Image (spheres, grey):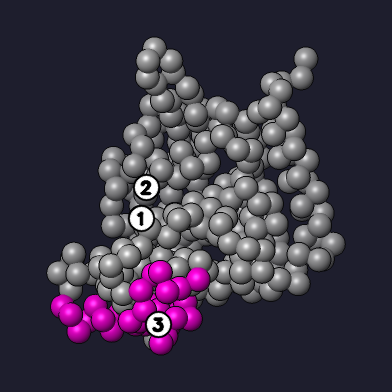
Amino acid sequence: MRDAELTSAAPGRIEITDLGIAFGGNGRTVEAVRRFTLMTTPGEFVALLGPSGCGKTTVLNAVAGFVPPTAGRVVVDGELVTRPGADRGMVFQQHSLFPWKTVLGNVEFGLKMRGVAKAERTSQACAYLSLVGLTGFEHAYPWELSGGMQQRVGIARVLVNRPHVMLMDEPFGALDAQTRLTMQELLLGVWREVRTTVLFVTHDIDEALFLADRVAVMSARPGQIRDLVTVKLARPRAAEVIATPEFMALKARVLALVREESARALFGPRT
């Protein structure tokens, strides 16, 4: 793919300030996120990691514009987030492809909705399918693809719209271990080309450290940042990095934090 086709449309700076989110109903309120603050630099890859129920996906949904804040604010490239927008693309754990459309039709869909001419949207869609290694599958249907291939289509469908920020909610969580590692390496290759900002939710410590520039370790609910870990591992990264002493030292640090917060989520704070 040509460099011009891979240029990110905008810097992709995320500013989350004192974010609070609570859900209520039937006289009961659950505080999911409290005073969550995070700033990303353009083109940065940041992972959100923490115990189940700590609010990782809630934060992601707030950046996407799906969930309104109870307190604080979310700003992307200087604009207050109040609703979903084309500047933010979401990749879910379940691929959410249209089963009645071909691979090409799925990737073209957003461009079609924006009124892009047929020839141009087909050209762009094919370029991004090539980037994720799916040339030759343009006319296949989602049900004919493996889980990893379906997620690659989902990534291409988001990137073809040139979002400023790509939001990823455990996109590889349903895959087997080998496919998952392959997809992680593919994602790093794609991200190295497009350089869009990525906010990535995961439960997996190895995945977070392998992919990210920084890992935001979240506390038990109500979620806030317990620690922000900088991953000083050279790029580009290959799977072999997970066996290095540097990686293992980072993993031990993050594992201790996650275990402590997981215990708090299960048993409450120690007295």
- On screen, residue 10 versus residue 245, left or right, reads left
Q: Secondary structure at mark 1?
A: strand
> Could you tell which of marks 2 and 3 lies nearer the N-terminus?
2
Residues at marks 3 and 1 touching, judged by CB atoms closer than 8 Å: no
Q: Nearer the viewer, residue 180 or 119?
A: 180
* Residue 64, numbered label: 2
Residue 28 pos. (x, y %): 43, 15
How far is disc 3 from disc 1 in space, using C-alphas?
26 Å
Residues at marks 2 and 1 touching, judged by CB atoms closer than 8 Å: yes
The N terminus: image quadrant:
bottom left
Residue 139 pos. (x, y %): 33, 81
Which residue: 43% across, 25% down?
22
Magenta highlight range: 117-146
Q: How many numbered marks does the figure carry?
A: 3
Q: Nearer the viewer, mark 2 or mark 3?
A: 3
Q: What is the crowding at mark 3: few (fewer than 14 residues within 10 Å), some, or many (at least 20)?
A: some
Instruction: Name the residue carrying label 3.
Output: 137
Which residue: 58% across, 28% down?
221
> Could you tell which of marks 3 and 1 lies nearer the N-terminus?
1
The amino acid type, in three-letter code, at marker 1 is: Arg
Q: Is residue 60 above or below residue 214?
A: above
For this orientation, the residue located farthest to the right is: 245
Q: Nearer the viewer, residue 180 or 13?
A: 180
> Could you tell which of marks 2 and 1 lies nearer the N-terminus?
2
- Residue 120 within the segment the image draws in magenta: yes
How far is disc 2 from disc 3 in space, using C-alphas?
29 Å
Instruction: Name the residue carrying label 1.
Output: 88
- Residue 216 within the segment the image draws in magenta: no
The C terminus: image quadrant:
top right
Give the image quarter of residue 118: bottom left
